[in-house]
Amino acid sequence: MSNPIIVIENLSKCYANSNEMSLDNISLKMDSGEKIGILGPNGAGKTTLISIICGIMSSSSGKVKYYIQDNEVTYKSIRNRIGFVPQNLALYNELTAFQNFEYFGALYRLSKKQIMIQYELLFPMLGLTNVADRKVKTFSDGMKRRLNLLIGIIHNPDVLLLDEPTVGVDIQSRNAIISFLNKINGKGTTIIYTSHHMGEAEQLCNKIAILDYGNLIAFGKTKDLLLQNNVSDLMLLLMKLTGEGFRDNV
Amino acid sequence: MYKVWISIKKEFYLLFNDKTGLSLMFLMPLILVFIITIIQDSAFKIINENKISLLIVNHDSGSEGNKLKDMLDQTRMFNLIENNNIDFSEVKKEISKENAMVALYIENSFSEKLNSKTIILSKLVMANIGMNDSVNKKELISLLPPTIFFFNDPVLQDNYCYSILNLIHSNLSIIENTKMLEGLYSEMGYDSVPQNIKESIINNKIPIKRIITSVDDNCKIPNSTQHNVPAWTIFAMFFMVVSLGSNIVKEKLSGSFIRLKTMPTNFALILFSKQIVYLFVAIMQVILIFSIGIYIFPLIKLPELTISSNTLGTFIIVIISGIAAVSYALMVGSISKTQEQSNGFGAISIIIFAALGGVWVPIFVMPEYMKQISKLSPLHWCIDGFYTLFLRDGNWLMLYKPILILLVFSLSCQIITYLKLKYDKLI
C-alpha cells in the first residue's frame, strides 16, 4: 500500500472579485511516487489548485494535508521538500543561467558546495552546461523552460509541482523535459503537473485528475479512465467529459 | 550568511546590467551639478564676492566730488568706472548698455553748493549760541542744496539699491560734517580745524562687530558649490527610484516574488539585499559628487566644497538620506503595476519633490508659504541636514530634527511597501 503525501479535503476557492467558484469542494489523495496530471480546459481551476497546494494562495474553505512517512505535517515543515515550476518564467533575464541557479539554490538553503554538486549533476541532463555562463535573455524559450525546471528541483524535492512546464517549447525540449521528469520520478520524486498537451500527459502520468468549472469530474489511473469511458486517448476523454464548447470567451 | 551574500550579489549583478539606471544615478547628477553650479556661481558671487560696477560722472568744478569718489572707492564694494566726458542724458545709456549696474552723476556746482550750505549753517549755529548775529535769513531761504543723481539697472533688487544709497549717504555725511566743522572753526576765527580733532570726528563711528551664527567660529560663506553639491547629490539619491522601482516591478511581473513564496526564505531578506545594494549606491554617489566638488571644481575656478568637521554627523546624514531614498523607491516599486508607471511616477515625483525641497532654488529665496510647503518634501530635510552641517556647522541638537523626520518618512514608506505587497499576496 502506498503512502499519501498530499491529501486534499473539500477544497474550495472563490476569488475576491468573482461570484463563481474557481474550485468547488475538491477532494483528492496523492500518493508518494505518483505522476499525477491535472488536466482541464482553460479556467478549469488547474493553476488555482496547484497554487494552493504549494502555498502561494490560500483556499476559501477545505484543507490541504501534507504527509511525511504517514505523519501529517504543516506546510511550513514540508516547504523545503516541495519544488515548484511556475508557468511564468520566474527567472532573472539579466543574470546568467548559473547565477540564477546559484541564487535560487542559496534561497533553498543549499551551501555553495551543494549548489556545485547539483549544477554538475543537473545541467548536463537538460543540455545547459555549455550555456551556463550566458545571460538568460539570450536563451530560446525551450532553454528558459529547461532552466526553470532545473531551479524547481535544485533542492531534490520529494514533491515537484509543475504548472504547464512545456508551454511554447519545441519538440526536442519537450521530449527532454518529459524524459527528465520520468527520470527523477524513478528516483522517488512525486510529480504533480498541469498541461494542455494530452499526448504529453499520457506519456508521463500514471494518474489523471480532470477539472471543469472548478469541479473534479474524474480522478484515477490513466488506463482505468480510458477504459471506463471507452476512449482510446486522453484528448478524446477530455472532449467527452468537458464538451466541445469554448471556455475562454465567456 | 551564504544566502544573504548571494542575494546581495544578485542585486549587484542586476544593478550593473541596468545601464540606464546607472547613468541616471551617476552620469545625470554629475552633468547637472557641473552645469547648475557654473550657472549659479556668478549669481552667488554678486551677493558674496563680486563688486558692483559703479560709474561716476564727476562734473564738479570743486574738490568735494573727488573726495566722495575716493571715499566710495575705499569701501571696496564697487568697481569704480570714472567717465567725466559724458553728460547727464548719456548716463542712462551707459547703464542700458550694461557698462555699469549703478551710476552717480555729480553736478558741476556740487562743491560750491555744499560750501555755501555749510557756511550758512555754521553761521546759524554760531548765531544760535550767541556768538554771531549776522545771519542773513534771505540767504538761508535761497540756499540750494547740492544734488547727486543716482541711476541703477532695473535688474538690481530694491533692497540692494537702498544699501548702496545708504552707503553714499553715509560718506556724504562725513564730507558734510567735515565742512561744517571747518565752517564753525572759521566763524570762531581759526584758520583751520586741528588735524587730530578733524580725524577723531570723522572716524568717530560706533563700531559694529559682525558675528556669523555658526556653532563654531569656522565661518563658511554660502556659495554655489555649498548649495549645489549636496542638493544634486540628494536629487541623484532619490532618482534611484527609476532603477530600484522598476527592478521591483520587474520581479513582481516575472513571477519571481511568487516563486520566492514557495521557498524556505524570508521575504525580508530580498528587501534587505535590495536596500543594502542601493544604500551602497547612495554612498558611492556622495563620494563621487563630493569628490568632484572638492577636487575638480577648484581646477575650473569654481568654489571648493568645504565639508563639515562633524564627520560622524555627515556620515549619519548621508546614511539617513540614503535610507529615505531607498525606502521611497521601494514604495513606488511596490505600488506600481507596470515599469512605465514606476518610471513615470517615480521620476516626476522626484522632480516635484526637488523643486519643492530647494534643490533647484535655495529655500531661503522662496516666499513664506512655499517655505512651509517645502517641508512636505523629504529632499528638503536632507538638504536641511547638509546645510546644518556645511553652512551652520551644526551639532547634534540642530541635526536631530531632519534625522527624526527622515526616519519617520523612511519607516512610513517601508510600512506602505510591506502592506501593499501583503495586500497583493506577494509576501
Image (tube, rainbow, N blue to C red):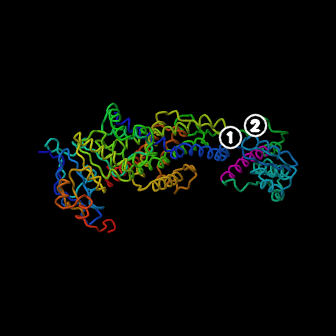
Which image quarter: residue B185?
top right
Toward the top, the furthest residue is A113
In this rendering, position of residue B349 left or right of residue A232: right
Location of residue B158 in the rendering, given as x and y in whole percent from the top left corner: 67, 55
Residue A139, numbered circle: none
Location of residue B186 in the rendering, given as x and y in whole percent from the top left corner: 83, 43
Name the residue that disc number 2 marks: B199
- Write down the region rendered in magenta: B159-179
Residue B205, numbered circle: 1
Location of residue B22 in the rendering, given as x and y in whole percent from the top left corner: 51, 43
Residue B228 visible somewhere in the drawing:
yes
Q: Which is more toward the observer, A82 or A34?
A: A34
Residue B383 visible somewhere in the drawing:
no
In this rendering, position of residue B161 left or right of residue A6: right
Q: What residue type is labelled 2?
A: Glu
Graded by Cα atoms within 10 Å as few (under 14), some (14 to 19) or many (20 or more), the crowding at tag 2 reads: few
Q: What residue type is labelled 1?
A: Lys
Residue drawn at x 74%, y 54% as measured from the top left: B152
Mark 1 secondary-structure assignment: loop
Whether residue B7 appears in magenta in the rendering, the answer is no
Could you give the CA–CA distance between mark 2 and mark 1, rounded to whole angstroms? Answer: 11 Å
Q: Which chain carries label 2?
A: B
Q: Which is more toward the observer, A7 or B215?
A: A7
Task: Establish if A68 lies above or below B1.
Answer: below
Q: Which is more toward the observer, A103 or B352?
A: A103
Mark 2 secondary-structure assignment: helix
Whether residue B166 appears in magenta in the rendering, the answer is yes
Q: Which chain carries label 1?
A: B
Question: Which SS does the magenta portion mostly show?
Answer: helix
Location of residue B51 in the rendering, given as x and y in whole percent from the top left corner: 72, 44
Residue drawn at x 33%, y 65% as measured from the top left: A248
